[in-house]
Amino acid sequence: MDIALCYESVLPARGGAETYIGDLARRLSRDGHAVHLYACRWDAASLPAATHFHRLEVPAGPRFLRPWRFGNECERAMTMRHDVSIGFDKTWGQDVLYPQGGLHAASAAHNLLKHAGPITRSLAALGKMLDPAAWSFSRLERKQYLGPKQPLIVVNSNMVRRHFEEFYGVSSESVRVVRSAIDPLRFAAEDRLRQRHEERERWGVSPNDSVGLFVAMNYRLKGLSQLLDAYALTPRDKPNKLVVVGHPKFGRYERQAKRLGIADRVVFLGHRSDPKSCYFASDYLVHPTFYDPCSLVALEALACGLPVITTRFNGASELLSPPTDGMVIDNPHDSDALAAAMAQMFDRGYLREASVAARTTGSRWTFEHHYQALLGVFTEVRRMKRAA
């Protein structure tokens, strides 16, 4: 097939969607498909040598206008007749749209849930109404999915498929669920036990401590404040620690831990370019997010044999079978429920069994499974276009 990929920047070293697009391009090329990339910038060394590059020039300007300009450039430049074209972010006109970050409308609604009280939530909603970026992204999203050319939509969880119907009335018949995936070989290491021991020594954590790991860049959206409140309710009679990895600025949360009297049990590590050794050194992942279409952090933890505590606002929760391989709570603000889930992880017997189950869960869906499912969507699109 002749396949066009549309994304503004494809520099796989930066991670996230850019790494994913690089992986997908290589896998498509390996199967003999012709890959075209429409982008403003890319790292050619990280992409297949046979890739056909189409550079798009987008003028500088306000952040909220840039997606409009890139989308317009994509539409103007894509004059070739590809078998399938796919956009991964704020573009329109492609055959397939794959919003890996979920819906902006849903994300905005869930962001308000960070505020526990109705007054602060209402004030935050008012602020968003006055934000030109929020208004612009909302209008652009309606153009993407409610315009004259209806795309086939790929999402990474049933939760996001429900959001399309809830916010835009898009029928589930127009949406395909292809779950996100990670490469489990990234977490294969012969010296895993040595890394675990050395990392714990650096943290000042004993071999008997049950260690919960929190990994995120956006501490507010992923529920770190709520996590600290809940952790303060967990028992101290069993040795345990909480390790926080992510954004380098964590002073606010460090002060919160001191106010709660848990500073001696919380280790703030800041940013780690590769948190692999943090997974190895921990016993479970706790991710009380307010919004995640399908958290890669949860998938990485499962691949490392860590049971996962998360919320129903995380599409990855659909992969879990609580309490076998983790726990799912309804509301990040429910400190008692979150504390009870963590307290369960202090039981070494439970942890041993849950770790085995978590690894099994993580191995059921690989990048190859993901790729074959996505290729099935591409084949479906080509067939529909030919029939038309």
Image (cartoon, grey):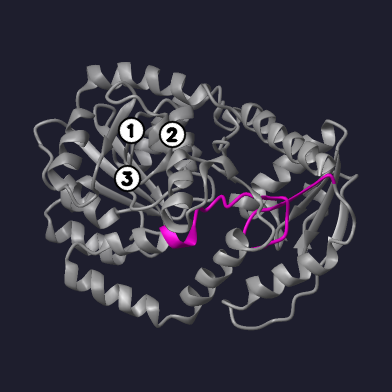
The circle drawn on residue 243 is 3
How many residues crowd around disc 3 within 10 Å: few (fewer than 14), some, or many (20 or more)?
many
Image quadrant assignment for residue 1? top right
Q: CA distance from mark 3 to mark 2?
A: 14 Å
Q: Let me know if residue 78 appears in the view.
A: yes
Would you say the residues marked 1 and 2 are in contact, meaning their CB atoms lie under 8 Å apart? yes
- 1 and 3 marks in contact (CB < 8 Å): no
**Is tag 1's residue or tag 2's residue first in the polypeptide sequence?**
1
Tell whether label 2 touches label 3 (CB within 8 Å): no
The circle drawn on residue 284 is 1
Q: Residue at x 48, y 81 (%)?
A: 132
Number of on-image labels: 3
Q: Gap in Å between the C-alphas at discs 1 and 2?
A: 8 Å
Whether residue 247 is visible, yes or no, is no
Residue at 23%, 29% (x, y): give it: 345
Question: Which residues, given as a range, are shown in magenta?
Answer: 83-106
Question: Element under label 2?
Answer: helix
Badge 1 marks a residue whose secondary structure is strand
Q: Is residue 221 left or right of residue 264?
A: right
Q: Is residue 98 magenta?
A: yes
Q: Please report whichever mark, 3 or 2, sits nearer to the chain's N-terminal start.
A: 3
Q: What percent of the width, then of the height, locates residue 298? A: 43, 38
* Front position among marks 3 and 2: 2
Question: In the rendered image of this protein, does residue 26 appear above or below residue 353?
Answer: below
**SS category of the residue bearing label 3:** strand
What is the magenta segment's predominant secondary structure?
Answer: loop
| Residue 80 location (% of width, % of height) | 90, 56
Which residue has dot 2 on it?
A: 301
Left or right: residue 47 compared with residue 19: right
- Mark 1 or mark 3: which is in front? 1
